[in-house]
Image (cartoon, rainbow, N blue to C red):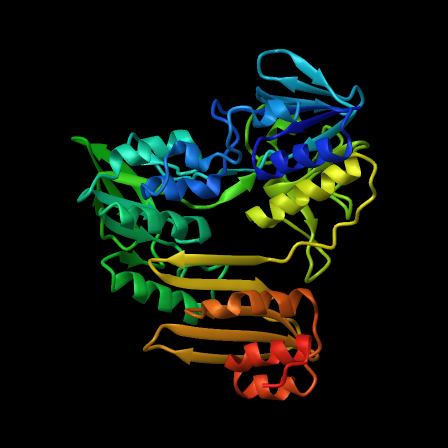
Amino acid sequence: MKHVIIGAGPAGVVAAETLRRIDPSSRIVILGDEPEPPYSRMAIPYLLADNVGESGTYLRHGDAHFETLDVEVRQARATGVDTAKKSVALGDGGAIDYDRLLIATGACPIKPPIEGIDSEGVENCWTLADARRVLAGAQPGSRVVLMGAGFIGCIVLEALAARGVELVVVEMADRMLPRMMDETGGAMIARWCASRGVTVRTATRVTGIARAGGKLTLATDSGDPIEADLVVCATGVSPNTGFLAGTGSAAGTSGAASAGIECGDGILVDHRLCTSAEDVYAAGDVAQGPDFSTGRQEVHAIQPTAVEHGRIAALNMAGAETPFRGSLSMNVLNTLGLVSSSFGLWMGAEGGERSTAVDETRSRYLRLEFEDDRIVGALALGLTQHVGVLRGLIQTRVRLGAWMEKLRTDPTLVMNAYLECTQGEAR
């Protein structure tokens, strides 16, 4: 059996290791289009903050890890898939055949349609090559503009602030972390950042970027320009599906059945992580798979989901039928020392109830979303001890019973509710 994996990120690496464990006689090939060993994009901010060197971003350490596993890691760019011939076209004009194929190509940064977005000094922060350029430009005291205050943007924010730059964050939504936090939480994070020397401009759109004399000027829809030495663009990502149309590009092909592989927002997969094409699977940020909370197919571009996708897909590729129960939408983020988290249906379930507790002085916020007598979603800010509890209550669908009424009145009792409902320890 020959397993080919397109993508050398967490999903691809975990899949290869799982396949080798349960299918020891198979041939396994990982295709990655970057020159470095397989690495984690989520570790790049630690590199920017000088907490690790480049090798600290590598997913596996040891010179012979993949050789010991007899897993071939090949630098090659996939430019198309022929599902009838079971073949992957490569950028060098060659091809590689497969018995089972896993597409784990991840996502790519979205560049907003702004004049000057390709100017020198305007960088993404997605690859190690990007990180090297950002490191060169983000010197102490330099003026840096971060476009985008979503999850990825706020991770990069933390790293840039650690470098001692003069940082301005521009977000076109009305709050920071608009896909993870409500208005209360987003505003609280913005105030926290401002109190630590970061300028935050929400509800602001960059309309153009001009470079002159080695400096950048950003025009905004407020009419107030921003000067910068470096611009870091973190305005979102899109699943890497464009190569399925044979283009070799990273652009998505939403809604298309490229190469016989059905796509929506990402590559559509079932409860086995199998695509619409026989013997083709997908995992990680490129996969649109079952959502734990809704049962609908969603893209959850987070590393824990990628790792679990890779494991489950590999088991099924090797013939060990294993259902995927669905990924829980969850994010945990540290922004300059303020930890925020969101889980499940944090925006609320139709017909459900909500309970909130806010402490502006101590930057603490908790919001619970209920459906019947279960917690189905939650937001937390400044409450790190609640992170595991909230996730556990949602994923195990614990019935709260008498604790439901108590949590309606005081959601901060959620730890007590968890202990009694799951372990029988009255509090």
If the image is split into quadrants, where does the C terminus sit? bottom right
Where on the picture, by quarter, is residue 241? top right
Q: In the image, is residue 98 above or below residue 14? A: above
Q: Where residue 233 appears, x then y in whole percent?
A: 37, 42
If the image is split into quadrants, where does the N terminus sit? top right
Count every numbered label the image shows and give the total.
0
Q: In the image, is residue 416 above or below residue 244? A: below
The structure residue drawn at horizontal position 66% and vertical position 29%, both measured from the top left corner, is 5
In this orientation, which residue lies closer to the viewer: 337 or 101? 337
Q: Where residue 351 appears, x then y in whole percent?
A: 67, 77
Q: Where residue 137 appears, x then y in whole percent?
A: 25, 35
Q: In the image, is residue 104 above or below residue 161? A: above
The structure residue drawn at horizontal position 46% and vertical position 67%, both measured from the top left corner, is 384
Q: Where residue 191 appears, x then y in whole percent?
A: 30, 66
The structure residue drawn at horizontal position 60% and vertical position 71%, both measured from the top left corner, is 348
In this orientation, which residue lies closer to the viewer: 287 or 391? 391
Horizontal side, residue 153 vs residue 58: left or right: left
The answer to whether one can see residue 390 in this image is: yes
The answer to whether one can see residue 112 in this image is: no
Horizontal side, residue 81 vs residue 413: left or right: right
The structure residue drawn at horizontal position 67% and vertical position 32%, both measured from the top left corner, is 16
Horizontal side, residue 260 vs residue 198: left or right: right
Q: In the image, is residue 388 above or below residue 290? A: below
